[in-house]
Amino acid sequence: MVHPDLKEGKPSMFIAGNSDEAKGKVAEILNAFNWDIQDMGKVEAARATEPLCMLWCIPGFLKNEWNHAFRLLVKQGALRILFFIIHKR
């Protein structure tokens, strides 16, 4: 969780909430922990990101390895959003 060292780059942490002040404080902590912050907007967006936890658990349970994370990739000039799991080697 703190300073993830993944050769593919910083993993993404998704945040959502109605308080910009609270999200700002969370973003400060995540920056200190070396995460890429992805603000998904208001609290309603949290519902859409919660299933990512279950998806994150699947490779961990299958391989008993917990050295992976998500990263959000955004192609510039396009509205395509890609998720992939990155693994610590």
Image: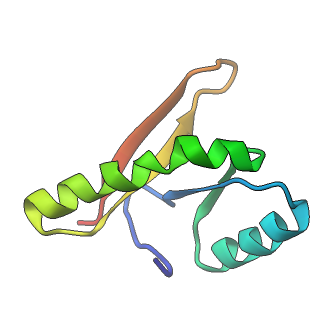
Count of numbered badges drawn on the protein: 0
The residue sitting at 38% across, 41% down in the picture is 84
Is 84 located above or below residue 23 in the figure? above
Across and down, in percent, residue 38 comes to 66, 51
Which one is in front, 89 or 33?
Answer: 33
Across and down, in percent, residue 17 comes to 76, 56
Across and down, in percent, residue 31 comes to 68, 72
Across and down, in percent, residue 44 comes to 70, 43
Which one is in front, 26 or 71?
Answer: 26
- Identify the image quadrant of residue 48: top right
Tell which residue pokes out farthest to the left in this image: 63
Image side of residue 20 versus residue 2, left or right: right
Is 69 located above or below residue 2 in the figure? above
Image side of residue 65 versus residue 10, left or right: left
The residue sitting at 70% across, 19% down in the picture is 77
Q: Which color mode does the image show?
A: rainbow
The residue sitting at 58% across, 72% down in the picture is 34
Image side of residue 65 versus residue 31, left or right: left
Is 2 located above or below residue 54 in the figure? below
The residue sitting at 32% across, 48% down in the picture is 55
Q: Quadrant of the C terminus?
A: bottom left
Tell which residue pokes out farthest to the top in this image: 78
Which one is in front, 16 or 79?
Answer: 16
